[in-house]
Amino acid sequence: LRTDLLGAIDAAAGLDGLESLRVHALGKQGAITGLLKTLGGMSPEDRQVQGPRIHGLREAVTEALGARKGALEKAVLDARLASERIDMTLPVDAAPPGSVHPVSQVMDELAEIFADLGFAVATGPEIEDDWHNFTALNIPESHPARAMHDTFYFPDDAAGERKMLLRTHTSPVQIRTMIGQKPPIRIIAPGRTYRSDSDATHTPMFHQVEGLVIDKGITLGHLKWTLETFLKAFFERDDVVLRLRPSYFPFTEPSAEVDVGYTMVNGKRVIGGSEGWMEVLGSGMVHPKVIAACGLDPDEWQGFAFGCGIDRLAMLKYGMDDLRAFFDGDIRWLRHYGFAA
Ligand code: PHE
């Protein structure tokens, strides 16, 4: 029995075969199990002889099973390693490189143009409180401008104290900057803004860039020169014409909306000349109340501010016609306008 079993174990070709050998020898009905059971009926003398033999057989078989199992498992693993070998030196399909989104591109262009004019880039939170977004900007609780902003509000906290909202414009960065640093101030603040509004020219999330200058003796002339210089540099043309229309913003006085002139070329509006006008930004001289709300003396410090839609600027410069496509993340759209390879 011993030679038979050990020979069969050594010859077992697979783990399944080995398992049935184990059952055959050591299982409940197994040959060795059967022998062990006979020990109980033997005379003490026989048992003394047979006991060690049978137990020795069991040990030898158990050991042989374990050794064979290890060998078979190793063979299986070796085969798998050989078949799944990866050639690390094979060339891979190159993933297409990422590309810059037009909005990021325009933000970079703005930062560069204004850096040349001595403006730093400032930022503020997109989740704002009511005071920075409205009150400090001379838009008190009951002001109709609040309703006009289609604000996304967060639910009031337990105390109903500080109303939080998604900033409806980048103008709260004016407030944070005037509070946070000493004048003279020259900053632009590009970033995301939110209003509950959606059609071909409005998306609930959009981008603005704020401009703010606070210094001594700042006039409307400085504002006009700055905007003209900025828009000529941005559209890369000297024939950019600006039109300032008197307007109203609670945080500037006087206020002006700025149109830029365009010419029709092959049925498309091209910036330059003055065949037609397109509104591109809101601006004005910072209201003395706003300067005072930030703890500065309006008799000492004056300035101008402007706010401009970045997505609109990108559309005008690069010829896109549907704002919503900006935020679809479709690489084919980027490719179409030359933003992706
Ligand atoms: N915050 C205004 C808007 O979103 C734009 C603006 C900014 C106007 C600064 C004047 C001065 O419409």
Image (spheres, rainbow, N blue to C red):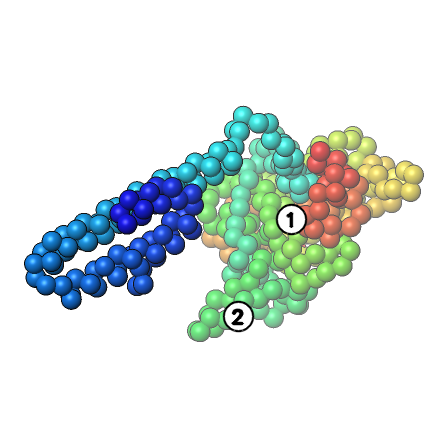
Residue at image position (60%, 45%) is 190
**SS class, disc 1:** strand
Vertical placement of 155 versus 340: above or below? below
Between residue 87 and residue 72, name the one nearer to us: 72
Q: Secondary structure at mark 2?
A: loop
Mark 2: is the Cβ under 8 angstroms from ligand 1? no
Can the viewer see residue 242 in this picture? no
Residue 107 x/y as whole percent: 63, 40
Local packing at callout 2 (Cα closer than 10 Å; few below 14, some 14-19, many 20+) is: few
In the rendered structure, which amino acid carries the disc numbered 2?
Pro
Q: Residue furthest right?
A: 266
Q: Dividing the picture into quarters, in which one does residue 216 lie? A: top right
* Three-letter amino acid code of the residue under disc 1: Gln
Please give the label number shown on residue 208: 1
Q: Eyeballing the image, is 235 above or below 21?
A: above
Residue hosting label 2: 155
Lower position in the chain sequence, tag 2 or tag 1: 2
Whole-percent x, y for residue 45 in the image: 7, 58
Q: Residue 160: which numbered mark, if any?
A: none
Residue 50 in the image, given as x and y percentages of width and height: 15, 55
At 54% across and 37% down in the image, what residue appears?
Answer: 120
Mark 1 Cα shell of 10 Å, populated few (<14), some (14-19), many (≥20): many
Is label 1's Cβ within 8 Å of ligand 1?
A: yes
Q: Residue 253: where, in percent of width, then height?
A: 65, 53
- Residue occupying the point 28% across, 44% down: 3
